[in-house]
Amino acid sequence: MGRDAEAVRVTTTGARHAPARLMGALRSLELPVQHACVMRVHGATTVQEVLVDVPAALQDGDALRAALLQRLQDS
């Protein structure tokens, strides 16, 4: 089966190394990143936008969101 692209947006406040943690979670899920953008807003909030290729197994409902949240909580 093919892969489809999905946009992921993560907003964090005061999280240490948030971009590295997100990239690590994406790597552990073997999700190829097409594009990523990290912005720091008002010095405390980090907004990350990532476009990833999503395998069919994670395209169902909230499967991608649940998998990412689990990986981020474990890190």
Image (spheres, rainbow, N blue to C red):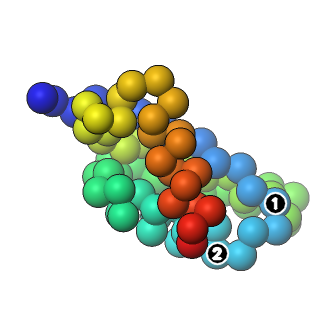
In the figure, residue 46 lies in which quadrant?
bottom right
- What residue would you read off at disc 2? 17
The crowding category of the residue bearing disc 2, from other C-alpha atoms within 10 Å (few below 14, some 14 to 19, many at least 20), is few
Q: Position of residue 43 (x, y in %)?
A: 84, 66
**Left or right, residue 74 beside residue 54:** right
In the rendered structure, the answer to whether residue 30 lies left or right of residue 38 reads left
Residue lying farthest left? 1
Indicate the secondary structure of the residue bearing disc 2: loop
Report whether residue 19 is seen: no
Q: What residue is pinned by disc 1?
A: 13
Image-based side of 52 in relation to 9, left or right: left
Locate residue 65, reporting x and y percent. 53, 40
Provide residue 29's location: percent of width, then percent of height.
35, 56
Q: Is residue 52 above or below residue 1?
A: below
Q: Give the residue displayed 37% in from the left and 44% down from the top.
A: 52
- Determine whether the residue tagged by mark 1 lies in a helix, strand or loop: strand
Looking at the image, which is closer to me, 55 or 52?
55
Name the foreground residue: 54 vs 61: 61
Alpha carbon separation for disc pair 1 and 2: 11 Å
Say left or right for 67 vs 17: left
The x, y position of residue 2, in whole percent, is 15, 30
Q: Is residue 61 visible?
A: yes
From the viewer's perspective, is residue 74 above or below residue 54? below
**Tag 2: residue type?**
His
**Quadrant of the rendering where the N terminus is positioned:** top left
